[in-house]
Image (spheres, rainbow, N blue to C red):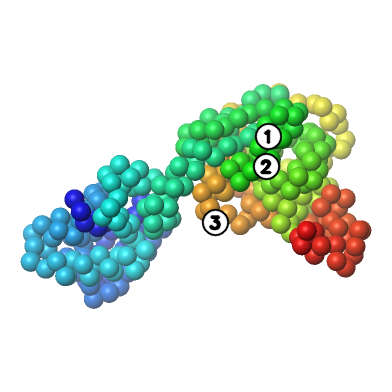
Amino acid sequence: MNQTRYRLKAGTFLAKREGDLALFHVLGNHVYLRDNLVDSLFEEVCRQIEFETLGLAEICETKEANSSSEAVRKRIGLLKDQRLLVEFPKEMNQDAILSCQNSFLSHFYNSPYQVNMLQSRLKTHQILVINLLSEKPSLESKLRAIGFEKVQCGSFKDMRNSTFRKETQDSSGIHYVVVGSWTNAYEIREINNFFYSKNQAWLLILDDLFGGEVGPFFSGIDGPCFSCMLTRKRGFLEGNSGFQLIEESLFRSNLHRRHIIKLPSCQDTLYSLASTELFKLVTDLPSPKIHRGSFLVDSLNFKIKYNEVFPVAFCETCSHINENPIGGTLAKWRN
C-alpha cells in the first residue's frame, strides 16, 4: 500500500477522554492533552492506531470517520505535534515497519529509519567484557537478551595482547566493560591507567555481596578516572555502612580474598541495570549521569542511589595540573 502509515509510539495509549481533555499513558507516565480536536473522532483514531499501523484511508473506513478524511488528518497532526505518534513513510516496506514498531526504541525516536539503524547497531556493536571475578558474571546473557549479538568475555591480559590492539584503530563500534569488585581495586587502577593512555572509554561494574555499583562510564572528557574514584571512596564521610565495608575490605584485609556466598537474585538486579546502561550508551539515549558518577545498587533493600564522582585536581592519572598548571588541560584537548 503506497501511503504514509501511522501508529502510536511504543508504550503509549489513550487511557481516558472527558470532553476536550485526553489522558495518555506513556511508559507509565501521564500526559494530558487539551484541545478542541479532542472528541469522539479523536478517541476513535487513537483506538485504531494503538495496535495497528494504518494509513489515512484505512482509518477513514471507520464508522465515524467515513465522510471526513480532512478531520482525521487534523487529529493525526495533533498526535504528531505532541510526539505521541510514529509516522512510517510510504516507501518503507512491511518488514522494516514491523522491525521498528516492535522495538522499544520507537518510543524515543520519531524516525523509523533511525530506530532500525539503532537496531542494526545493537547487532554489529562489540561489547568486550574484562572479567576480574572468579566466576563468570551473568552480564553476557542479559546483553544478548536485549539484542546485543557480539559480546566477548576475557581477561585483561587477553584484551591487551590481542583484541584491543586489533580493534583500537577504529573503536567507535566497541564498548569496553570492566567487571570486578573492590578487592580488585589495584587491578582496576592498572586497567584505568592503560585505557586512559589510549584515550579509550570504558564502563565500570563493581560486584558486591548484595548488589554493587554500575558506573561511571569513564570517557576521559573533562571527567574523573578510577584513581579519582578510589581517592573519593577513602574520603567518603556520609557514614553509609556500604562504604565502611568497602574501606575495610580494601585497606584492612587481604586484597585477594573473594566473597563466597552471594545471592543470585541480587546479582541479577545489578547486571540488569548494567545492561540497560550499555543499551542506552550504544543507542544514544540520554544517560548523562553515568558519565559523571555511579549507581549504588542495594538489591537486598531495593535501593538505588546515585553517587557523583568528581575529578581530583592532583590525580596522577588524569590531571595535568602538575605538568602545566595554567595550560595543561587546554593543551591536552588541542592535541
Q: Residue 192's quadrant in the figure? A: top right
* Coordinates of residue 288 in the picture (x, y in percent): 61, 57
* Coordinates of residue 272 in the picture (x, y in percent): 54, 38
Q: How far apart are marks 1 and 2 (CA)?
A: 7 Å
- Mark 3 lies on residue: 286
**224 sits left or right of 296 in the view:** right
Tag 1: Cα neighbours inside 10 Å, few (<14), some, or many (≥20)? Answer: few
Q: How many numbered marks does the figure carry?
A: 3
Q: Is residue 53 visible?
A: yes
Q: Are marks 1 and 2 in contact (CB under 8 Å)?
A: yes
Q: Earlier in the sequence, mark 3 or mark 2?
A: 2
- Mark 1 lies on residue: 166
* Coordinates of residue 35 in the picture (x, y in percent): 27, 74
Name the foreground residue: 149 vs 218.
149
At x 63%, y 52%, the residue is 290
**Residue 169's mark?**
2
Q: Which of the two marks, 3 or 2, is nearer to us in this view?
A: 2
In the rendered image, the quadrant that contains the C terminus is: bottom right
Q: What residue type is labelled 2?
A: Gln
Q: Is mark 2 on a helix, strand or loop?
A: loop
Image: 321 above or below 140: below
**74 sits left or right of 164 in the view:** left
Q: Is mark 3 on a helix, strand or loop?
A: loop
Q: Distance between the residues labelled 3 and 2?
A: 26 Å
Q: Which amino acid does label 1 sit on?
A: Lys
